[in-house]
Amino acid sequence: DGGITQSPKYLFRKEGQNVTLSCEQNLNHDAMYWYRQDPGQGLRLIYYSQIVNDFQKGDIAEGYSVSREKKESFPLTVTSAQKNPTAFYLCASSRSPSGNEQFFGPGTRLTVL
Amino acid sequence: RKEVEQDPGPFNVPEGATVAFNCTYSNSASQSFFWYRQDCRKEPKLLMSVYSSGNEDGRFTAQLNRASQYISLLIRDSKLSDSATYLCVVNRVNDWTGANNLFFGTGTRLTVIP
């Protein structure tokens, strides 16, 4: 079945540690995105990538880093510089950078203790 | 001003009721409009796109008023399974990158009561 996978579903880390969230898609989509969702707020864009080896900052990129070495993979690293990392992180993809519909993975719930 | 604003909810309605959600967007350059559904602790999933002419999918009807920058979603004959959070989503193409940027409302929570 085609789709987007994120792992792990739940992740706990100590304050000050970097952590990398996985996102993989087998839809052959060109564009991939990372969002975070906090209670009472809409999804906010962290980073996006239109094509392999290229990515752009979204609205809240500070404290995060990404890579896009393969078309199907777009990992997100939450660094110790991110002041409020506890959140629900959602990865999405779309067929092309200008494609309207984005498909979401199941999300990773990160809790920093 | 937020890019997308929605009714805060929550909406608690009995089975069989008709319920309407409203949404406004601030940027007139917005090009595409959607309603997504998000179940508790799950990812958002596309419910339907919204067209200027209005569109219907079974019990769901979406309307767009570009002049007023207003979007609505009507659910008729509510089912227990309709209980979820409904996200209003607006798309603009980034002039610099050509990328599709989505802007999400905070969502309106619906609970359908037996």
Image (cartoon, coloured by chain):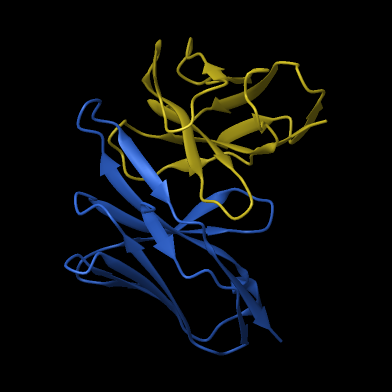
Residue A31 rendering spot, x and y as whole percentages: 39, 28
Who's the residue at 55% across and 51% down the image?
A41
Q: Is residue B80 above or below residue A97?
A: below
Residue A1 falls left or right of residue A13? left
Residue at image position (59%, 55%) is A40
Q: Position of residue A14 (x, y in %)?
A: 82, 23
Q: Nearer the viewer, residue B81 or A63?
A: A63
* Percent coordinates x, y for residue B46 in the rendering: 46, 54
Image quarter in which the C terminus of chain A is found? top right
In front here: B62 or A89? A89
x, y percent for residue A95: 36, 34
Residue projecting furthest to the left: B67
Check the image and report above or below for B77 versus A37.
Answer: below
Instruction: Please tell me which residue is depicted at 19% across the width and 65% down the height of the picture.
Output: B66
- Residue B110 visible to an observer of this rendering: yes
Q: Quadrant of residue B79?
A: bottom right
The structure residue drawn at horizontal position 42% and vertical position 30%, both measured from the top left corner, is A58
Question: The N terminus of chain A lies in which quarter of the figure?
Answer: top right
Using the rendered image of the protein, determine whether residue A2 is visible from the camera's viewpoint. no
Q: Which chain is yellow?
A: A
Task: Count all numbered tags in the image, as a single digit.
Answer: 0
Which chain identifier belongs to the blue chain? Answer: B
